[in-house]
Image (cartoon, rainbow, N blue to C red):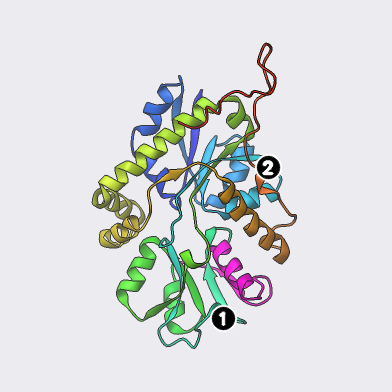
């Protein structure tokens, strides 16, 4: 079968995977081929998996939680190492805001539904405030930096090359580094059927992800030029952003699931998701013992390379 991999600009590993041969090479070892499906917004990953448009996707921390809350039966397959320098909550240098609590009543621009929602919601929650009632969260855009500098908004969550460019230009201050609040991992997930019926496919995809991360680590300038040519921005800012990422894939751990559960609980409390979710449900189930197997034993987990 052809394995369709979802690709959008906000997931750096999948973005570069789609421009290299690693997926095709690794899937060939299990008798499959690779197809890439580009789409604009990682928030759509859950529905695209459920509808069979894609077989595998990756986002930040928030979309898999909202996917679960919407009833999509997803399975986590891997995560990146923490990305403490991926983004930051910015204010102007002369802003009176010294803590997140000082943003109460203000307008904050962010990529709603992305990891940035997790950052802002948890930072407010840690300070006894609510994402739902104590700030005005608005979807950021190309004009967010200008609006911040003009005083039209109180704060802006910037990431990647936009953050690098904004900091290089000066006049802005980091109110809150991401790493002080959340781990901000890149998260990879799939449909339950694929995870449980074809763990060999998942293992092949994870090998391809790891090879891609190794390539970017070894070729940051070339990777930056690819992104700048395709997505815009300056190569130097892309290189700064890419060098700030860990480029390391990890297994899904109890620690990660606990991080996700804390985020899900905050989202449910402030009404960002319509119902509570149990993030530990989004893992592959152990296969049923086969005839002749020894009682009390299970098949090995082949989803890990």
Which residue corresponds to the image point at 31% horizontal and 56% vertical from the top-left? 243
Which residue corresponds to the image point at 29% horizontal and 57% vertical from the top-left? 239
Q: Nearer the viewer, residue 3 or 85?
A: 85
Q: Which residues are magenta?
A: 116-141
Asked whether, in this view, residue 168 is left or right of residue 10, the answer is: left
Q: Where residue 227 sits in the image (x, y, percent)?
A: 33, 52
Asked whether, in this view, residue 71 is left or right of residue 252, the answer is: right
Q: Where residue 42 sits in the image (x, y, percent)?
A: 53, 50
Q: Which mark is residue 92?
A: none
What residue would you read off at disc 2? 281
Q: Which mark is residue 103?
A: 1
Give neighbour class at mark 2: few <14, some 14-19, many 20+ (Cα, 10 Å): some
Q: Where residue 270 sits in the image (x, y, percent)?
A: 70, 66
State the SS at label 2.
Answer: helix
Q: Where residue 143 sits in the image (x, y, percent)?
A: 44, 71
Judge whether residue 153 is colored magenta. Answer: no
Work out which residue is located at the far top of the displayed protein and give it: 292
């Amino acid at each position: 079968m052809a394995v369709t991999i979802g690709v959008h600009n906000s997931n750096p590993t999948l973005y570069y995977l789609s421009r290299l041969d690693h997926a095709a090479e690794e899937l060939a070892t299990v008798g499959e081929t690779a197809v890439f499906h580009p789409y604009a917004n990682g928030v759509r990953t859950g529905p695209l998996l459920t509808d069979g448009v894609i077989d595998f996707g990756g986002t930040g921390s928030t979309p898999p939680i909202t996917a679960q809350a919407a009833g999509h039966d997803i399975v986590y397959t891997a995560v990146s190492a923490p990305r403490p320098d991926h983004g930051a909550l910015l204010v102007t240098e002369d802003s009176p805001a010294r803590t997140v609590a000082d943003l109460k009543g203000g307008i904050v621009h962010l990529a709603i539904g992305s990891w940035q929602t997790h950052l802002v919601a948890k930072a407010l929650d840690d300070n006894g405030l609510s994402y739902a009632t104590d700030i005005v969260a608005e979807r950021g855009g190309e004009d967010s930096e200008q609006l911040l500098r003009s005083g039209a908004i109180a704060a802006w969550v910037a990431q990647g090359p936009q953050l690098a460019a904004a900091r290089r230009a000066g006049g802005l201050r980091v109110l809150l580094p991401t790493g002080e609040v959340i781990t901000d991992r890149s998260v990879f997930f799939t449909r339950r059927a694929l995870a449980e019926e074809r763990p060999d496919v998942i293992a092949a995809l994870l090998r391809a992800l790891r090879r891609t991360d190794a390539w970017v680590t070894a070729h940051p300038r070339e990777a930056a030029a690819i992104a700048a040519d395709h997505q815009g921005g300056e190569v130097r800012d892309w290189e700064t952003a890419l060098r700030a990422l860990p480029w390391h894939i990890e297994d899904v751990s109890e620690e990660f699931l606990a991080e996700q559960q804390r985020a899900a609980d905050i989202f449910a409390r402030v009404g960002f998701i319509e119902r509570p979710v149990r993030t530990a449900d989004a893992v592959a189930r152990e296969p049923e013992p086969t005839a002749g197997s020894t009682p009390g034993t299970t098949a090995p987990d082949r989803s890990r390379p």
